[in-house]
Amino acid sequence: MLLTSLVNNFLETFEIETNLYYFIMLFIATFTCYFIMKPLITLIVSLKSTKLLTYLMSSLLVMLCLFIVSMFIEQLFDPALFKTLLQAISLFGIVLALYYSFLRLSKRI
């Protein structure tokens, strides 16, 4: 509630529309995430971990598709559906890790 009143005061003081405020905040968040993720991605690429990058990109693509579909059916995004999506992606990651661990162990034997 305090944060909401601070944001409203800021918007009224500088006469900024709400959509513009959210646009600026999302731009700053994206910009920050880019510089936080860049060293991590560089490390993953240098370790030649294509499986991890493929998993991350496929997970992001599935989330993006879910958001796009929810926009086209003109229905508000359901948090329960998002929770289920995150659980499915997590389960897929666990199964993928177990599969490749099993393959690595079977090569050693």
Image: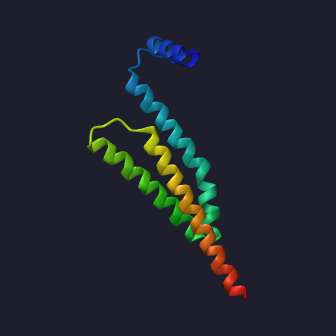
Q: Up-down: is 93 above or below 31?
A: below
Q: Quadrant of the N terminus?
A: top right
Q: At 60% across and 73% down in the image, what residue appears?
A: 99
Q: At 61% across and 62% down in the image, what residue appears?
A: 42
Q: Outermost residue, right direction? A: 109
Q: Nearer the viewer, residue 12 or 103?
A: 103
Q: At 53% across and 38% down in the image, what residue appears?
A: 29
Q: Up-down: is 21 above or below 108?
A: above
Q: At 48% across and 57% down in the image, what residue appears?
A: 59
| Position of residue 37 measured from the top left corner of the image (x, y, whole percent) | 59, 52
| Position of residue 107 measured from the top left corner of the image (x, y, whole percent) | 67, 86
Q: Is residue 86 left or right of residue 71?
A: right
Question: Picture quarter containing residue 95?
Answer: bottom right
The colouring scheme, among rainbow, by chain, secondary structure or one colour, is: rainbow
| Position of residue 68 measured from the top left corner of the image (x, y, whole percent) | 33, 47
Please count the marks in the image: 0
| Position of residue 72 measured from the top left corner of the image (x, y, whole percent) | 27, 44
Q: Is residue 99 left or right of residue 13?
A: right
Q: Quadrant of the C terminus?
A: bottom right
Q: Up-down: is 104 above or below 53?
A: below
